[in-house]
Amino acid sequence: MTRHAIDNLWGMPTSSDSPIRMPYRCPACDKTLYSSAASRPGPSSTLRARLLYLTAGIVVAAIYLTLLIVLREKFSWTTPLGNGWVLVQYPPVKLLSLVALPVALVPGVAIGWIASRIPRVRVVRCWSCRWSQRFPLNAVWASAPSEPAAHRGSTGIQPIVDDSDPWEECKAWAYAEVRQGRLPEDVSEELIGQGWPRDDVEIMVEQCRREARDRRRGEPRVRR
């Protein structure tokens, strides 16, 4: 079987496919999806892959514990103590793990390999209208649309357009909170609780913390 056939078997994009473009603006509300390249989503596993990884962990744990119980009972021995008493002894768990763990890892690794073969995707979301769509890894970002001259008024003045970006508003709020002395961890947790992606929030709050720190260093100190 050729590499091209294997890629088609797993649903992976091939070199002959034309690249898919991810939108710069939301198709539903026409808002800018991501203000900077750093805030754009990274590759993530699909729900099917995550379920397979979870299944692999459960299978490994179940087989490992079952083998430990079976081997523990299989290789136990008894020592008579007299008066009808018997001492039951079992081999050490560490010794039994040398046999049980490799056997349990075999199906887990096989299931994990199948999960790793499922193509990863990028989940593009709009935080204004909650629009979302999944794109393959070979998809490219569309360039920012340019404003045509025909959209301008007869006087040559650009019409006023509401181009407020929720991400920029969120960034300004986070900077103000950090500037006032609030802990960056508290700001991050509040934004994450509102539905913003954790990775983007942590990067953005860290940038706000550094900007606030640099600005405080540049301000003159008042001596009493």
Image: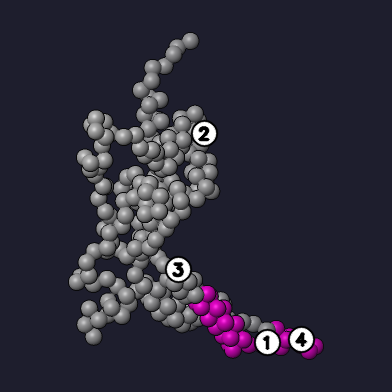
Q: Residues within 10 Å of mark 1 (few under 14, many from 20)?
A: few
Identity of the residue furthest to the left in this view: 16
Q: Residue at x 40, y 50 (%)?
A: 29
Q: Is residue 74 above or below residue 57?
A: below
**Nearest to N terminus: mark 3 or mark 4:** 3
Q: How many marks?
A: 4
**Which residue is identified by label 1?**
79
Question: Is disc 2 in contact with disc 3, using a CB cutoff of under 8 Å?
Answer: no
Q: Residue at x 26, y 53 (%)?
A: 142
> Which region shows up in magenta?
58-87
The residue nearer to you, when weighing 216 against 192, is 192
Instruction: Measure the alpha-carbon separation of dots 4 and 1.
Output: 9 Å
Q: Amino acid at mark 2?
A: Arg
**Which residue is identified by label 3?**
47
The residue nearer to you, when weighing 163 against 149, is 149
**Which residue is identified by label 2?**
182
**Residue 199 showing in the rendered view:** no
